[in-house]
Each structure stands twice: as structure tokens, then as C-alpha cells.
């Protein structure tokens, strides 16, 4: 075949201008639009936080056993980016209150909540945390719901809830973060029970006036589960 003739395999072929680089230009794998991501700062920040929600180590009763089981390899809480339990509230995004809340413990919960950086979220795990559980009627020392102390974003009923229910609660927290609008949330001023045994934290209202739960700036969800 003559060198000046076009090979039959290349005859009539219409090469796309993205297939080969132009002379003198650096080689870029793939097409330019495949290497370009268009997003907003709000979406990027929300994606970063929902992929790394770090809980605070705050197990105060038997529900903490199920919370610890959720972090093991069978349920693998770390696949949601939430396996790094922090021992300090200043490095935590999520408070999982797992257990019975007493009036003496209430001021500690509020103090740790105030030390967490914004935005922060709270999961009430178990019947005792949500409403006092079996101590609701005669437990003089038990707070009838942690939402009287801090705003709760997700309730997980059960005695105790299964690890799958806690995973569902973490995913609902991720949904809240994904739908968050930056700069539009306000900080809630929450009351603290004054019979807490902790004198340094001044009371705001009395226990008798704490008849309604504190509402969060976000909508509250309840995770359905079987006991």
C-alpha cells in the first residue's frame, strides 16, 4: 500500500475532539467535564459533616451496652463515619444519651452539650432517656425525659433499642445535616433542673415548671423499633 493512501480502517472515521489532545497541550485523562464537580459551599460542608459525625462517649446506663455493640464489627458504625467516639465534647458533633438521666446528672449533660461546637445534635436512646422508663411514676430522682434539659433531634424507643435502631437514628441525623441551611439556625436557650446537686450551674427555672420539653431548631424524628 502506498504511504500516501489512507488506511481502510481509518477511512471515514470522525474522531471526537475530546479523544486526542491537541498539539502542545498537557494530557488530561478523560474528558474535561468528567473531572469537574459543580456544587455549593453549603452542600460541601454538609457532606463533610454527615460523613464524619463523631459521637460523644456518654453511656450512663444499660442502653450503653447496645451503643457499644453498634460500634463493633458486626454492625460497623464506622461505615457511617461515626465510629470515632470522642472523650471530649469539644471534638464531638453528636451526643447519644443512652440511659437513665437523674437530676444530679442533668447539669452535667447540659454542661457537656454547651461545650460541643455548633452545629450539634442529640439522640435520645431508650425508654429511660425519652421519658423516664420504669422510673417515670415513682422515680423521684429521675428526669422525665432528657428533652427537658437539651433539645433532642431523634428519639429511639426501646428497652433497650437494638443496634439496628441506633444505626437508623444516625442515618436520620445524616438526613438532617444534608438538609441543613447554613446561617439560618438559632441557638436555643435551654433550662436546667435546679435540684441537680451542681451549684456552679445556676438554675433558670424550677423542676415544677418544666412541664413541656425543649424544642430544637430542627424537626424531631422518632425511629420506630421493636423492643
Image (tube, rainbow, N blue to C red):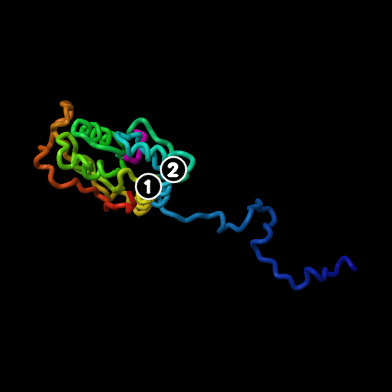
Numbered tag placed on residue 77 in the rendering: 2
Q: Which mark is residue 195?
A: none
Crowding near pointer 1: few (<14 within 10 Å), some, many (20+)?
A: many
Can you say which quadrant of the picture contains the N terminus? bottom right
Where is residue 90 shown, x and y percent of the image? 33, 33
Instruction: State left or right for residue 207 relative to residue 130.
Output: left
Give the secondary structure at mark 2.
helix
Q: Please, which residue is most extreme toward the bottom here?
A: 12
Range shown magenta: 90-96
Q: Which one is nearer the viewer's eye here, 180 or 168?
A: 168
- Asked if marks 2 and 1 touch (Cβ < 8 Å), the reply is yes
Examine the structure image and report whether residue 222 is included in the region drawn in magenta.
Answer: no
Residue carrying label 1: 170
Q: Quadrant of residue 118?
A: top left
SS for dot 1? helix
Label located before the other in sequence (2 or 1): 2
How many marks do you count on the picture?
2
Q: Position of residue 63 (x, y in %)?
A: 33, 39
Foreground pick, 139 / 28 = 139
Is 89 left or right of 8, judged from the image as shown?
A: left
Q: Does 76 sit left or right of 222 as displayed?
A: right
Amino acid at each position: 500500500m502506498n504511504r500516501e493512501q489512507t488506511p481502510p480502517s481509518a477511512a471515514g472515521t470522525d474522531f471526537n475532539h475530546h479523544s486526542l489532545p491537541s498539539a502542545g497541550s498537557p494530557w488530561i485523562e478523560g474528558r474535561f467535564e468528567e473531572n469537574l464537580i459543580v456544587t455549593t459551599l453549603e452542600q460541601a460542608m454538609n457532606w463533610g459533616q454527615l460523613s464524619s459525625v463523631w459521637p460523644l462517649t456518654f453511656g450512663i446506663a444499660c442502653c450503653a451496652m447496645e451503643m457499644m455493640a453498634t460500634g463493633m464489627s458486626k454492625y460497623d458504625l464506622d461505615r457511617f463515619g461515626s465510629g470515632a467516639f470522642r472523650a471530649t465534647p469539644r471534638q464531638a458533633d453528636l451526643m447519644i444519651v443512652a440511659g437513665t438521666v437523674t437530676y444530679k446528672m442533668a447539669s452535667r449533660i447540659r454542661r457537656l452539650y454547651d461545650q460541643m461546637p455548633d452545629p450539634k445534635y442529640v439522640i435520645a436512646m431508650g425508654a429511660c432517656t425519652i421519658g423516664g422508663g420504669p422510673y417515670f411514676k415513682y422515680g423521684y430522682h429521675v428526669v422525665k425525659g432528657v428533652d427537658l434539659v437539651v433539645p433532642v433531634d431523634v428519639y429511639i424507643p426501646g428497652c433497650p433499642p437494638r443496634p439496628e435502631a441506633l444505626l437508623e437514628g444516625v442515618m436520620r441525623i445524616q438526613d438532617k445535616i444534608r438538609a441543613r441551611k447554613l446561617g439560618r439556625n438559632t441557638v436555643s436557650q435551654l433550662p436546667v433542673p435546679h435540684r441537680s446537686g451542681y451549684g456552679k450551674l445556676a438554675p433558670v427555672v424550677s423542676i415544677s415548671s418544666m412541664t413541656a420539653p425543649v424544642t430544637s431548631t430542627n424537626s424531631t424524628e422518632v425511629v420506630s423499633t421493636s423492643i
